[in-house]
Amino acid sequence: EDGSDAMGPGGRWMMNIWQGSFPAENSLEDSYLSASPVKAYPANSYGVYSTVGNVWEWTSDPFPTRQQGDEEQWTLKGGSYVDSIDGSFNHKATVVTRMGNTADSGSSNTGFRCASGTGGGGRK
């Protein structure tokens, strides 16, 4: 799932992203102005919720910077509630979207995922 199909059965939004003219109007078609509860949308085929949109997820992966001497950055993935489905403003919200940020930065549209298990996964 690459995030290109934001609408689910019955025309219901399947992720929390901006709808409307950014930044002037969010039509709230998905019912959320900012971060939504984790289980607001159905889980993906791996049983994981909100992997696209809602908040950028911090990871433990370094983000490659382009210039030597730049401050170390970490990878954020997935986009957030201020991003778009098609990349027409801010970032395109998909499971493969990545950006870097420094460890001392924070925002209401960034967060992290708590997970437990033995790993290995597999589709349900």
Image (cartoon, helix red, strand yellow):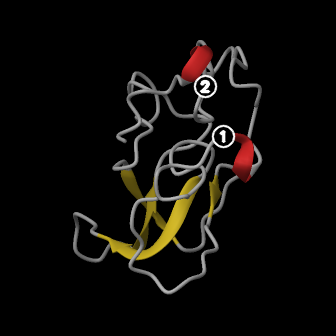
Instruction: Please state which of residues 14 and 80 is positioned toward the viewer in this rendering.
Output: 14
Across and down, in percent, residue 29 comes to 69, 17
SS at badge 2? loop
Q: Quadrant of residue 112?
A: bottom right
Instruction: Please state which of residues 96 and 66 is positioned toward the viewer in this rendering.
Output: 96
Q: Quadrant of residue 115?
A: bottom right
Across and down, in percent, residue 62 comes to 36, 76
Q: Are marks 2 and 1 in contact (CB under 8 Å)?
A: yes
- Residue that numbered label 2 is attached to: 13
The three-letter code of the residue at mark 2 reads: Trp
Q: Residue furthest bottom?
A: 118
Residue 15 position (above or below residue 19): below
- Residue that numbered label 1 is attached to: 41
Crowding around mark 1 (Cα neighbors within 10 Å: few <14, some 14 to 19, many 20+) is some
What residue is shown at x 56% (from left), y 21% (from top)? 9
The three-letter code of the residue at mark 1 reads: Tyr
Crowding around mark 2 (Cα neighbors within 10 Å: few <14, some 14 to 19, many 20+) is some
Q: Residue furthest front?
A: 124
Instruction: Please state which of residues 47 and 97 is positioned toward the viewer in this rendering.
Output: 47
Instruction: Please state which of residues 15 and 66 is positioned toward the viewer in this rendering.
Output: 15
Residue 36 position (above or below residue 67): above
